[in-house]
Image (cartoon, helix red, strand yellow):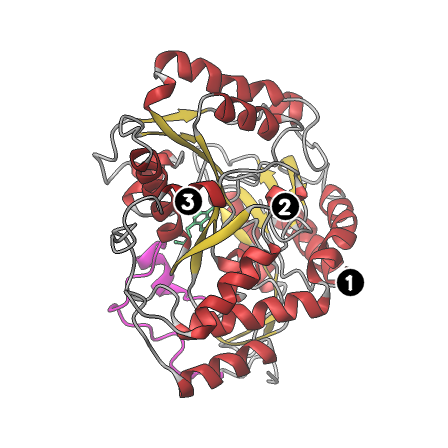
Amino acid sequence: MTASPQTNLHPRANDVGDSYWLPFTAMRQFRSNPMMFVGAEGMHYLAADGRRVLDAMAGLWCVNAGHAQPRIVDAIREAAGRLDFVSSFKMSHPAAFELAGRLTGIAPEGFDHVFFTNSGSEAVDSALKIARAYHRARGESGRTKLIGRAKGYHGMGFGGLSVGGIGRHKRDFGPLLPDVAHLSLPYDHPSMGFSRGRPETGAQYADELQSLLQIHDPATVAAVIVEPVIGSGGVYPPPVQYLERLRAICSRHGILLIFDEVITGFGRLGRPFAAQALNVAPDIITCAKGMTNGAVPMGGVLLRDFVFEAFMAGPPEAIELFHGYTYSGHPLACAAGLAALDVYEELGLFERTAAIAPTWEAALHSLRGEPHVVDIRNIGLLGVVELSPRSGEPGVRGGLCAQSCYEDGALVRASGDLIVLSPPLIIEEGQIEQVAVSVRSALRQID
Ligand code: PMP
């Protein structure tokens, strides 16, 4: 990936036409100033104008081992030439079984089964369906209710959207699933702001689940779904003991606990899964993103043995789960997944993440006191710098800050007035410093 700066590598890069409707994008604004990339390698994107831009977002929370990782690239190439596609309905291929074994090998103890999907959204909707079907298989078909959480992001399927807790995502698409309740955000700005890592206070927010179960008969509740660390909703690490308390309440009432680890899976907190880093065992884990290092779409649902076994009680010729996708366990995705796990292991990437996380924390919190900064939250190699909104213009300040960083050579994500950071786990100390310097100088420049 070499190019001299300011040469336009793609002469028509700014001529984007109007055929392609991008997700979550202000199309008319995008067309007037399209952010276009033509290459990527390691920690960097190559922009269409020839500039190398430090990727502080790991693509979209997914490129954990850095871009165009040679071993993953080779594996995908090789697989594409050997077995391009095979249905996973009543047939399969060896790499799918190998990957399933490798995944359950790094998953928390007792997670012995995996169901493949093609995205995080599909993983979540699959998990919710499996939770309901699990209770039905055990003769408790009245357990259908689902409990999510404010600010939760569980993808864009109707199931994930229903249990999700970001109002703007739901507004235009109702009615959503009935029989869904939500816990509130376990966070209070004045008292918990600028916590380093997990807030020490706030465990009592979990007791809300107990209150909800006074409104909803526990025998009607199938599952509680939470991200161990709220990601897209604003990077909120769980208060100490909060997840433990949720776990205890679920166990007491026979409710399945689902951790949505689409972001936290594959090392972001310094262990394969957040369940291990935070030492709380759910019953079902959803994952995606880092599963293939972002190189091929893939997701999965990891299941504790007792959940899987509940489906195996019928006659052997009976299909146990009437659910799946054309591309479940796709050969290219499996090849990418296997290579990604090899790379993570060889680099010792998860341990490295745990080792460098304190440097990350210190760099982020050095931004405290800069203009507009009202909170900073971090855990593992995740972080957010929350800005005060400009009066009457929410989101503008965040957008200006991200734009300024981009011009300075660092790609950060603005989500409203949040500057969200989730770099590839291979980030070096000097690059952490570069991100902090970029955000600092942006904050000092904007308005
Ligand atoms: N769950 C979580 C926690 C996520 O962060 C995301 C994506 N950011 C999803 C689900 C949805 O994943 P996808 O976009 O791959 O469908």
In this orientation, which residue lies closer to the viewer: 119 or 369?
Answer: 119
The residue positioned farthest toward the front in the image shown? 315
Please give the range of residues in magenta. 9-37
Viewed as shown, does residue 50 lie left or right of 298?
right
Residue type, mark 3 in image: Glu
Quadrant of res 385: top right
17 within the magenta span: yes
Residue 415 in the image, given as x and y percentages of width and height: 48, 46
Viewed as shown, does residue 194 lie left or right of 314?
right
Viewed as shown, does residue 312 lie left or right of 303?
left
Q: Which mark is residue 238?
A: none
Residue type, mark 1 in image: Gly
Q: Is residue 102 above or below residue 437?
A: below
The residue positioned farthest toward the left in the image shown? 175
Residue at the spot 40% in from the left edge and 11% down from the top edge: 214
Which residue is labeled 1 in the image?
430
Q: Nearer the viewer, mark 3 or mark 2?
A: 3
Q: Is residue 228 above or below residue 293?
A: above
In this orientation, which residue lies closer to the viewer: 47 or 318?
Answer: 318
Query: For numbered disc 1, what is the local secondary structure?
Result: helix
Q: Which mark is residue 383?
A: 2
Residue 95 in the image, given as x and y percentages of width and height: 47, 73
Q: CA distance from mark 3 to mark 1?
A: 49 Å
